[in-house]
Amino acid sequence: MKTILRKLFVLILVMSLGAPMHTTMLYAAPAQEMTAAQKAKAKEQAKKQKEREKAAAQKQKEREKAAAQKEKERAKAQADKQKAQAQAAKDAEKKKAEAEKKRAEAAKDAEKKREAAAKQSEARQKEAAKAQAERQKEQAKAQAERQKELDKKQAEKERIAAENEKKAEKLAAQEAKQKEAYYAQFEDNGPKTEAVSLFNLYGRVGYAAMFDKIDLEDRKLIGGPGAGLGIGYELEYGHFRFNTSLDFTWLNSSSKYGFMETRPLYMGNTGIDPNRSHHYFFSGYREMRNLGYVGIPIMLGGQFDRYYFAVGAKVGFNIIDSYSGKGKMDIMEEDTRYASWIPVEADKEFDGMKGKTGLSPLDLSVCAEFGIDLDEWLQKQPDPKKKVKVKPGERLPFGREHVHYRVSVFADYSVLNNKNEHDQLPLTFSNENGNPEKYPTGSHSLVSLHSGSPLNNLFVGVKFTIQFEVPGKQPRQVPPPASYADIRVVDNANSQLLANSTIEIKDTDKDRIKLREKVLKQGTHKQRLAMGNFSVYATAENYYPLTYPFSLDSAGITLPVELRLNHVPVFRVTVANKETGVALPAKVQIRKRGTEENRYLLETDSARGASSAMLSDSIMYSLHIEQMGYEPYDALIANIGDSMHVQLTPIKKGEVFIMNDLFFASNRTRILSSSEKSLNDLYMFMQRNPEVRIKIMGHTDSVGKDAANQKLSEGRANAVRDDLIERGVAPERIEAIGYGESRPIDTNDTEEGRQNNRRVEIEIM
């Protein structure tokens, strides 16, 4: 026991002194208590310990040697460093000396360069001064040339101005002279009327018809062409016209007839068979008549401006009177003994012989004519350069333009045209020897064979006349000198000229435009006009148009005409959130007061919430706004020039509003592209109110099955929800539900009511 305690004490002591001591102490136990193995082991350990100590001493020696070597090397490195520093200092001193030398050389070179630059600068200055002197000389020369050109242009302007002034004075003198001559002709018993003689050469073409009263049921008038030439005389005295002429007229007219002719049957040399006869049936027998006569018309009429008319009578003498006939006939033989009809021949061609109609030589017709003078367009103008045209009804003095042109429509109708009557039958059946033939050998005109059938001729068409004027004894009436309207378009508020305004001048007496729309760049215009009543219509941007009547009652005057336009007032409206004051984009409807008729539609922006328009002052207006997420707003517009600030009240939690202008495909959940504005408005409402959550509720009408309507309403609500999510609205802010047809707001008995029930509502949550 003691031995154990002693070993434990030794072990504790060794552990407290460290591992080497522990080993020593461990094996320091009494030898008598160690076994041989233990001794060998202790000896081995002592040997190893000795070797370790030796190795440690060797390492210590090597460390000391290495430290000495390192110290030696450090000392050497220090010496080398000091040597290098000394060499570096020496080199630096050398470099410094070299740098000083180089600086001195550079300073010397710089001085040389400065001297050279100074010389060059002096040379350049001399060259620049020389060039400047040359430029100044050139500029002076160019300035002199420009001044010379300007003086030349100014002289040209002054010359043109002097010429224009001279021309203006000459024109003013001419107008004054014309004015004096114009008023002088009224001094004695009013204006003098000039008698003018004209010789006419004319041609006529048109349609001719010869009316007869032949006693046949089957007859049809076709008519034909007509033509004529004439030469005549016309007398003009003021508005009065008298004319007569000698003309030749040729008429051609056709008529169709249907008739029957019966003759006994000849039996050669035996004579007439009393029981048999031949019947000749004509259908579509065409008789063409030609008539040519010389006529002398006597006509009276009048002329007003470019238009004229004449009526009268014409006595004619027939010199050409002919006809020709042809057609087809059916021949039937009748036997009275057997009461039978036997066809002999069908569609037999018959070309009757030509001959005279049998009209009497004299003819009497009534005549009428209405036409227009063509001098404005065909007559050579008096002043081609200035393009002063002949006025309607005006003719120039003899010697300058004495040829006049006119075109007219005319009508001649024969009221007395006797004819010579014949007793012959229409058809001839005898040959040149007088023997009877089976087929007709000739014919007579149907007109001449029917007693009591006068031939009335009609000739209507177009007449072109060339007139050669002979001066009358009395002087022509002096035309009135031109007058002018000096037109100014100004602002009624400040009397400033309105540039780029537009005017249009109308002759109210003749209901004719004298000056079509003309833009006045400076707001003024001088218009040459004859005496009469006129009106001028003026417009300008942002101004009310104005029509101003005026009269030029004297010749050769200049009448100032001032049109004072009133500026169209501007109506302005701004829209904002009532609670936050933030500007809102909204559709503002301007309605006719007391109705829902939209006259204007304004769209405010999100930056200022403002918009404006120019409203017509002819009606009273009201303002209406329906903006998604806000309560509707209505107000009266007191004045079209007002500025209204509208504050919309936001819809509170629990409030429900209908999405207007939201459209779906029929019986489908697909949203149509026309709904873009409504969807974007809802999206912008969600963006402006990030704390708001909404419920989208779909509704349908009662048409169809309940289950289908329920599914359709859910699909449409979800379609709106999906669109908002695609635009960027968080899904948790949106609920969608469908109610089908369970919540109608109107009757389902009418189309309008069903349309109101088909809706999508938004509830603020």
Image (cartoon, rainbow, N blue to C red):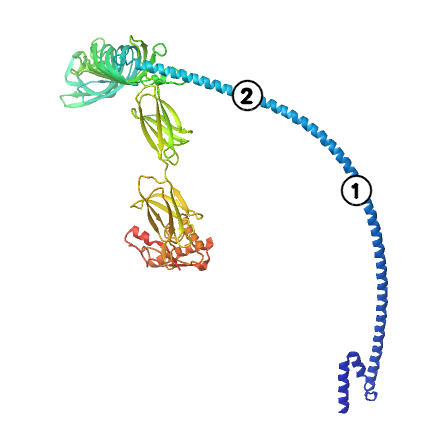
In the rendered structure, the answer to whether residue 606 lies left or right of residue 404 reads right
Residue 165's spot in the image, x, y percent? Answer: 43, 18
Amino acid type, callout 2: Glu
Q: Secondary structure at mark 1?
A: helix
Front of the two marks 2 and 1: 1
| Callout 2 crowding tier (Cα within 10 Å): few <14, some 14–19, many ≥20 | few
Question: Does 40 sit left or right of 193 as displayed?
Answer: right
Residue 740 x/y as whole percent: 35, 58
Picture disc at residue 120: none
Q: Secondary structure at mark 2?
A: helix
| Quarter residue 65 falls in | bottom right
Distance between the Cα atoms at labels 2 and 1? Answer: 63 Å
Locate the N terminus and report the quarter of the image it occupies. Answer: bottom right
Location of residue 360 in the rendering, given as x and y in whole percent from the top left corner: 20, 10
Most foreground residue, 585 or 419: 585
Tell me how many marks there are.
Answer: 2
Q: Can residue 331 be seen from the camera position used here? A: no
The residue drawn where x is 82% and y is 87% is: 30
Q: Which mark is residue 103?
A: 1
Sequence order check: which comes first, mark 2 or mark 1? 1
Residue 550 in sight: yes
Confirm or deny contact between disc 2 and disc 1 (CB under 8 A).
no
In the rendered image, which residue does mark 2 sit on? 149
- In front: 311, or 623? 623
**Residue nearest the viewer, comparing 43 with 224:** 43
Q: Residue at x 44, y 18 (%)?
A: 164
The quarter holding residue 130 reads: top right
